[in-house]
Amino acid sequence: MSGTVTIVEVAPRDGLQAVSAFVPTEQKIALVRALAAAGLVEIEATSFVSPKAIPQLADAAEVLAAANAIEGILPSVLVPNRKGVERALAAGARKLGLVMSATEGHNRSNLNRSVEESFNDLADIVATMPADGPAIRWSFSCSFHCPFEGVVAPAQVLALLERAVAIRPGLTFALADTTGNAAPDQVRALFAEAIARFGSRARFAFHGHDTYNLGIANVAAAYEAGVREIDAAAGGIGGCPFAPGASGNVATEDVVWLFRRLGVETGARWRELLEAADLAARLAGGGAASGHLRHVRAAREAA
């Protein structure tokens, strides 16, 4: 097997958002720099959400400014609504990650809105954003399982995609296993159908969590279905504070190791990535290195 895959590194945002103790701004910036030094180009640096909802990300403008100053990377920011977009653009955002949930229960818990309200808001943002404006990626949380509604029917996600793809061809749509409950057959089937229906007009990304230790298997399934953009967090840190039971993200080092074994290029530099993962684990409260990282080091340090 050969080819390339893009890893979108989400540790600075998704990895840190649920950490209760405030991580100093300079340490968040240090993490972004370490990830960039590891060869990761697409880095989700922060999110422009209400500081009342997620105090950890109250320094979004400062973190984004520092990320924008790093040569060779494309920082992105997560935004859930028009207000967040306006704040992000004022701070110099070059890539926006629009986000909503595929289910009513999680969308109301996470965004305090109905699915239709969020969809209409994001659709208007996409339709009115100038062609020479920032890049846009649209994510649907809970595309496979919802902590409030259980397993999500593929038809529910595909119906949202059909409406979204029609607004502006060429966007990337990320389908997220927010709770980490998905299994590879489920991931493979949904992406295969989405790509079959909409692949000529859209690109797709997979965002996975590792609650039941199927994260890396789900990444492989998404790749087999044709997905070429994978979200991951160094050190496997993270979790959604509005999705009860969700654990950390799929670890970037696991994703890089998988694709390295498959002969698929990621652009990541292995030893620098392990250093960045150690830093991410420390910032997330994992000590000098998380248990996951100690295992990785023992098995792969000499690779």
Image: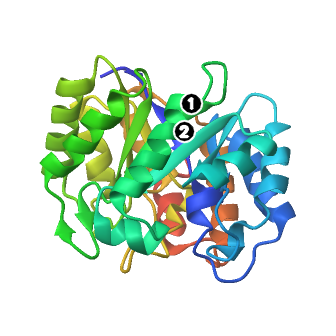
Which secondary structure, mark 2? Answer: helix
Residue that numbered label 2 is attached to: 125
In the rendered view, does 98 fall on the left or right side of 179?
right
Q: Residues within 10 Å of mark 1 (few under 14, many from 20)?
A: few
Three-letter amino acid code of the residue under disc 2: Ile
Q: Horizontal and vertical percent for residue 130?
A: 62, 23
Residue type indicated by callout 1: Thr
What residue sits right under mark 1 in the picture? 128
Position of residue 123 measured from the top left corner of the image (x, y, whole percent) = 45, 39
The dot on residue 136 is none
- Against 197, is 212 above or below? below
Q: Give the residue at x 76% y 61%.
A: 28
Callout count:
2
Residue 267 is at least partly visible in this image: no
Quadrant of res 173: top left
The residue located at (31%, 60%) in the rendering is 142
User: Residue 187, can we see it?
Assistant: yes
Horizontal side, residue 242 vs residue 144: left or right: right
- Confirm or deny contact between disc 2 and disc 1 (CB under 8 A): yes
The image shows residue 75 at horizontal and vertical percentages of 68, 40
